[in-house]
């Protein structure tokens, strides 16, 4: 698998993702500056977390108009896998690659803690190593992680099997107490129509090796390396 990580001013998870990818690929991914206008031939593009452009204007809004995003959109339309994590999820919605929006957390506070997620489907390269119904623990760190979409869009996501992860209890129950930010229907991650673009608020790269306190995020990168190699 060949992978590229997009780097924006203010990104702070680009190197974390790069290390997680290198661990499963055996070589580092390409680090692509946001001002570039071309992407090399790759199998996976990662739009990482952080605070692109300092989260000015609206989270992800400015980064969505960076020159490289035209190439990311073109790659996605051509079938290349794209993963947007946290701020990357926000950027993908702002760029029109995913529906809905990430708005202020219900409590209007920044949240930084581990949460539990239930995997909703296993027919995607992003979750092939988990299996539907698997509960994983991943960290969140956001102030605008509250996923919002109109009811018609939510119903379409549900009907098309495009909800990738939901906030859940350790036992896999998706109740209000397990929802850290008010996201509609406990949604933590969604796919595009093809299943090749994933937006995810929690950070799999932050729990991808034992030294980080857990490995629940590593299977995502292992599954991608297997599926895309």
Image (cartoon, helix red, strand yellow):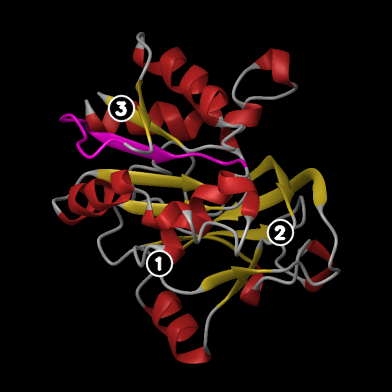
Q: Which of the 4 image quadrants contains residue 26?
A: top left
How would you rate the neighbour count of disc 1 (Cα within 10 Å): few for under 14, some for 14-19, many for 20 or more? many
Quadrant for the C terminus in the image: top left
Q: For mark 2, does the 10 Å Cα neighbourhood hold few (<14), some (14 to 19), or many (20 or more) residues?
A: many
Q: Which residues are magenta?
A: 36-50
Q: Quadrant of residue 28?
A: top left
Task: Give the Cα separation between the discs numbered 2 and 1.
Answer: 17 Å
Quickly name the residue at label 2. 168
Query: Magenta span has 16?
Result: no
Residue 59 x, y percent position in the rendering: 59, 59
Comes first in the chain, label 2 or label 3:
3
- N-terminal label among 2 and 1: 1
* Element marked by disc 3: strand
Q: Are marks 3 and 1 in contact (CB under 8 Å)?
A: no
In the figure, is residue 205 to the left or right of 193?
Answer: right
Q: Residue at x 81, y 45 (%)?
A: 112
Q: How far, Cα to Cα, is label 3 from label 1?
A: 23 Å
Question: Does residue 134 appear in this view?
Answer: no
* Rendering coords of residue 204 (x, y %): 58, 36
Do the residues bearing badges 2 and 3 touch, measured as CB atoms within 8 Å? no
Q: Is residue 63 left or right of residue 16?
A: left
**Image coords of residue 134 (percent x, y):** 58, 47
Q: CA distance from mark 2 to mark 3?
A: 30 Å
The answer to whether 190 is drawn above or below residue 214 in the figure is below
Position of 155 relative to 129 (above/below)? below
Residue 152 in the image, given as x and y percentages of width and height: 45, 91
Sequence-earlier tag: 3 or 1: 3
Residue at image mark 1: 162
Residue underneath mark 3 = 3
């Amino acid at each position: 698998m060949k992978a590229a990580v997009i780097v924006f001013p203010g990104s702070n998870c680009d190197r974390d993702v790069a290390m997680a990818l290198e661990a499963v690929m055996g070589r580092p991914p390409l680090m692509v500056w946001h001002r570039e206008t071309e992407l090399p031939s790759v199998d996976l593009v990662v739009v990482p977390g952080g605070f692109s452009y300092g989260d000015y204007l609206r989270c992800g809004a400015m980064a969505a108009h960076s020159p490289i995003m035209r190439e990311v959109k073109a790659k996605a339309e051509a079938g290349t896998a794209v993963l947007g994590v946290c701020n990357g999820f926000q950027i993908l919605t702002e760029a029109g690659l995913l529906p809905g929006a990430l708005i202020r957390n219900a409590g209007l506070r920044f949240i930084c803690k581990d949460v539990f997620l239930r995997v909703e489907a296993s027919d995607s390269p992003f979750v092939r190593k988990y299996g539907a119904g698997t509960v994983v623990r991943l960290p969140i760190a956001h102030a605008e992680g509250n996923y919002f979409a109109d009811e018609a869009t939510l119903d379409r996501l549900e009907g098309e099997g495009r909800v990738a992860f939901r906030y859940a209890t350790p036992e896999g129950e998706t109740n209000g107490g397990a929802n850290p930010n008010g996201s509609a229907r406990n949604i933590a991650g969604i796919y595009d129509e093809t299943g090749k673009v994933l937006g995810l608020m929690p950070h799999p790269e932050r729990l991808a090796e034992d030294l980080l306190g857990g490995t629940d995020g590593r299977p995502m990168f292992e599954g991608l390396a297997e599926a895309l190699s």
